[in-house]
Amino acid sequence: MLFAEDEDALKSAPAAVASGPRSLALLGDESIAEQKIVAGREEPCRANAWAGIMDLGLLRSKVLACSDCSLRSGANNVVFGDGDPRAQVMLIGEAPGQSEDESGNPFVGRAGKLLDGLLSEARLRREDVFICNIAKCRTPRNRLSEPAEVSACLPHLRAQMRIISPRIVVALGALSSQTLVDPSIRVTRDRGKWFEEDGVHYLVTFHPAAVLRDERRKRGLVESDMKNLRAMLDRLCDKKR
Ligand code: SF4
């Protein structure tokens, strides 16, 4: 599977941003990385077929029955996602790998273990967050999802985000960052940065599988992103009080 370092080869994120993100002023906390706002992004996918669904269990049953793109025929399972349906934090990866496809659960195996460890840097447990992927079915030979596959699957993710209504979304890897934040994102350049749209704060960071391939260089960076996540979460909670 291609990950962040392969992002120049990434063609999957719908080219939907007319102009790049414009900077917002820092919100008075130097420990929080640069804030930007997502500007001019258009919804890249077809109309959301799940607009009326407000229950995550019902959405899950609909998505598990999906065969809207050709990926379903090669996958063992539709991997819907897992975690707290009222989570304040969603972590969104790219597509299921082999272990996820076999188990039907997101982020299992080595990458999942690593993610659990990274979450502990933010003083979070897996059951505190909601974890899922841009595409819900495994791609053949773990190739990148095609633009048509991303567009076909995006309504599922949009519906998950609408129902869960997180305050923070952590975009794991290039496909997730470029689809959710801005197609011009380069994870190696932009990781650790925050973006904001409609009150949701997006943090760009490496995909755990990319960290596994280069732990020496990337692990410390993602750990620092997770500490940054904790700081933002605390800050948003303080504001709410
Ligand atoms: S990848 Fe998404 S759109 Fe395609 S069949 Fe699976 S659930 Fe449906």
Image (spheres, rainbow, N blue to C red):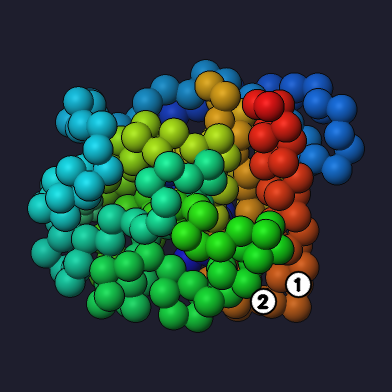
| Furthest residue in direction front, as rendered | 241
Q: Residue 217 carries which label?
A: 1
- Picture coordinates of residue 166, whole percent (x, y): 49, 37
Of the residues shown, which amino acid type is indicated by label 2?
Asp
In this view, 218 is above or below 203: below
What is the quadrant of the N terminus in the image?
bottom left
Q: Which mark is residue 111?
A: none
**Distance in Å between CA atoms under marks 1 and 2:** 6 Å
Number of other residues with Cα within 10 Å of mark 2, as a class: few under 14, some 14 to 19, many 20 or more = few
In this view, 226 is above or below 167: below
SS state under label 1: helix
Please state which of residues 76 and 175 is positioned toward the viewer in this rendering.
Answer: 76
Q: Residue at x 53, y 42 (%)?
A: 88
- Picture coordinates of residue 89, whole percent (x, y): 54, 46
| Residue 162 appears in view | yes
What is the quadrant of the C terminus in the image?
top right
Query: Which residue is the site of mark 2?
Result: 214
| Furthest residue in direction top, as rendered | 40
Please state which of residues 22 and 130 is positioned toward the viewer in this rendering.
Answer: 130
SS state under label 2: loop
- Picture coordinates of residue 179, whole percent (x, y): 45, 41
| Residue 36 appears in view | no
Number of other residues with Cα within 10 Å of mark 1, as a class: few under 14, some 14 to 19, many 20 or more = few
Q: Residue at x 65, y 26 (%)?
A: 240
- Quadrant hosting residue 49: top left
In this view, 112 is above or below 187: below
Q: Residue at x 75, y 78 (%)?
A: 216
Q: Residue at x 80, y 40 (%)?
A: 32
- Picture coordinates of residue 13, whole percent (x, y): 43, 43
Of the residues shown, which amino acid type is indicated by label 1?
Arg
Check contact, mark 1 vs mark 2: CB within 8 A. Answer: yes
- Quadrant hosting residue 108: bottom left
